[in-house]
Image: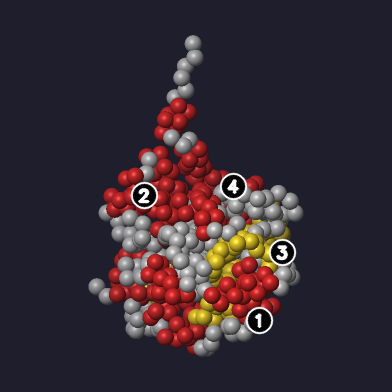
Amino acid sequence: MTDSALLKSTVVEGGYCVGCGACAAVPGSPVTMKMDEAGRLQARFDGVDEARTSLRAVCPFSDLAVNENIIGEALFAKEGAQPDARVGWYRDVWAGYVSEGDFRKRGSSGGMGNWLAAELLSSGEVDAVVHVRPDIDGRLFGFTISRSTVELKAGSKSRYYPVEMSSVFKEMRDNPGRYALVGVPCFIKAARLMARNDAVIDQGLRYTISLVCGHLKSDGFAKMFGWQLGILPNRLRAIDFRVKNDDGRANQYSITASGEDAAGQDVTRTRQNKDFFGYLWSHGLFKYRACDYCDDVFGETADVTVGDAWLPGLVDDPRGTNVVVSRNPRISALIEAGLASGRLTLDTITADAAAKSQDAGLRHRRQGLAVRLARARRKGRWAPPKRVQPEAAKEIEYRQRLVYETRETLSERSHDAFSKAVKTGSFETFKAEVSPLMKFHDFINQHKTLKSMVRAIVKPKRG
């Protein structure tokens, strides 16, 4: 079996393609990236295979992919960083925000991701930044290359939407230069794998900025919010997933969507996130299966990682605060200079504190992954090799295993349920399909022991 056929039979047909586009960017690749019926970008093998590099070697979920520990050690051990099993290699860890300009206001959290990219660009460290911006090639969002800070600012904020990198990799190859890449952990890993197998990409990829990641979403996630605001699923024109409120907590933000309603009118509407059906990330609606088989929350192969500071005291500020994990001495120097000049407001924190800011995500990606790997083994299904081992599932209490298995089932069912709802023209169809599983998940997740669950179901008679 050829290399591309192996990739197709394992990663793609197994449902583990995250849609990053690395395999499609290999010269001579038979792969193109296309949206599937569930609104996920997926690899499609519809061309002649003349690939000069192994496609599996650049896929972050293949059996040939070098894992995050190996990549991280090769990149950062010699730079004076130290390893941590949760956040990866690190030199410096901070929590805070950007004080200068409107970076914080425009960002999802404290504005650090966009500030770092802008600083690399304006200081001459890079010629361009590869990042996600709205309205690219007819899609709500897509990867693009910005060569000015004005262009770069249009890419502020988190985008919970399917995107892929094949076109920007090709542009980097066709136009050699110094690039910074902003992306989620598996996309940064894919870029590192590309660099290991492509001399031009290796030379051009100077810095990587990772976003702390919960998981990727299909386009159904955006359509679900738009539909609840009265915008038809296929008439959604724009969406802002993270609109900051003037008060409340940082995780109590709003969502704004624009598009056409059932009367044919163009509308723009906003609603608080907690007032939407399906907004909770713990339910995992519209999640890519690949995300349930990833053990990297903190973008361990990136030069620097930024995320939400979901920590006591910090989460209470609606303006947003970042956790920043630096692994690169040059990035640390840029941040230290920003602190010294008063452009940044940051406090040094420990790796433990950074990990606690993503405690639930780490638990789901490590403990939960062991359960999912064990489940795949029981079913005789191929799964990507991970740093987490399926044997660890034996040590996890039954109720917690059930929580993880229910989440995986709920995520997978949500795709078909939404497609069915769109065909029937009724959002209530979607709710009816997924609500029972959501309620079951919440019940078993609320009761921390099996005994508590049984007591809640079988209440003792009084008499």
Return the residue found at the far left: 1
**Which mark, by number, is residue 367?**
none
- Of tags 1 and 4, which is closer to the observer? 1
**Of callouts 3 and 1, the N-terminal one:** 3
Q: How is the image coloured?
A: secondary structure
Residue at mark 4 = 277
Figure check: 256 above or below 147: above
Instruction: Work out how far the residue at label 4 is from the one at label 2, CA to CA, in angstroms.
Output: 27 Å
**Residue 44 visible in the picture:** no
| Residue in the foreground of this view, choosing between 391 and 241 | 391
**Residue 195 visible in the picture:** yes
Instruction: Work out how far the residue at label 1 is from the one at label 2, CA to CA, in angstroms.
Output: 46 Å
Mark 3 crowdedness (10 Å alpha carbons): few <14, some 14-19, many ≥20: some
**Of callouts 1 and 2, the N-terminal one:** 1
Instruction: Work out how far the residue at label 1 is from the one at label 4, CA to CA, in angstroms.
Output: 42 Å
| Residue in the foreground of this view, choosing between 62 and 17 | 62
For residue 145, what is the image quadrant? bottom right
**Of callouts 3 and 2, the N-terminal one:** 3
Q: What amino acid is at disc 1?
A: Ser
* Disc 1, SS: helix
**Which mark, by number, is residue 105?**
3
Instruction: Work out how far the residue at label 3 is from the one at label 4, CA to CA, in angstroms.
Output: 27 Å
**Which mark, by number, is residue 371?**
2
Q: Quadrant of the N terminus?
A: bottom left
Q: Are marks 3 and 4 in contact (CB under 8 Å)?
A: no
- Of tags 3 and 1, which is closer to the observer? 1
> Which residue appears at 41% of the width and 42% of the height?
400
Instruction: Work out how far the residue at label 3 is from the one at label 2, CA to CA, in angstroms.
Output: 40 Å
Rendering coords of residue 391 (x, y %): 30, 51
Residue at mark 1 = 122
